[in-house]
Image (tube, rainbow, N blue to C red):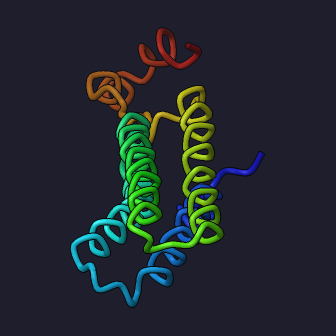
Amino acid sequence: MATIQQFEDLICWQRARELTKQVYKTFKDSKDFGFKDQIQRAAVSVMSNIAEGFERGTQQEFLNYLFIAKGSAGEVRAQIYAALDAEYLNIEMFKNLNNLASECSRLLQSFTEKVKGGAARGMQYKHIYKPDPSIEMLKKYAPKIYEQYYKNR
């Protein structure tokens, strides 16, 4: 399996982007500005938190942001029900948006499980070799002792 190099390659981010696009398109002419703002912000939050978590340095931070993104996907789903109840949506548009939001939640859950089980811990935990200064001095000033005790270890 190839390593993902950028958040744009993540399927969960791609679907969150589609959800955001559909939410903006659906409610662009809404006169209920408070509702419109809330659902748009929740939708953008899904894709933004996936991206921000990906760009963080540790696995634990990434997981935290994935959980936040999943919570925002749930918020979008709740807002979609409110839109249906307020008759801002017909049943077809409700089903479309609800399916997209639900898919985002499922993808985030699945991806979170994969990240939890992964071996990569993040860039902050990469081991960088730093030579012991005393051994380096020994190597420089007493090469025979260095060779005898350290070279073959």
Q: Is residue 139 left or right of residue 133?
A: right
- Name the outermost residue toward the bottom: 29
- Determine the residue positioned at 45% across, 45% down: 70
Residue 113, image x and y in percent?
Answer: 58, 31
Of residues 108 and 51, the one nearer the viewer is 108
109 versus 37 height, above or below:
above
Q: Is residue 1 left or right of residue 136?
A: right
Residue 121, image x and y in percent?
Answer: 47, 34
96 versus 98 height, above or below:
below
Residue 80, image x and y in percent?
Answer: 45, 60
Of residues 107 and 1, the one nearer the viewer is 107
Q: Is residue 75 left or right of residue 2?
A: left
Residue 123 in sight in this render: no
Residue 27 in sight in this render: yes
- Name the outermost residue toward the right: 1
- Determine the residue positioned at 43% across, 37% down: 59
The count of marks equals: 0
* Quarter of the view holding residue 49: bottom left
* Quarter of the view holding residue 45: bottom left
Of residues 76 and 58, the one nearer the viewer is 76
Where does the C terminus fall, quadrant-wise? top right
- Determine the residue positioned at 40% across, 87% down: 28
Q: Is residue 38 left or right of residue 4?
A: left
Residue 111, image x and y in percent?
Answer: 60, 41
Of residues 94 and 47, the one nearer the viewer is 94
- Name the outermost residue toward the left: 34
Where does the N terminus fall, quadrant-wise? top right
- Determine the residue positioned at 42% across, 24% down: 143
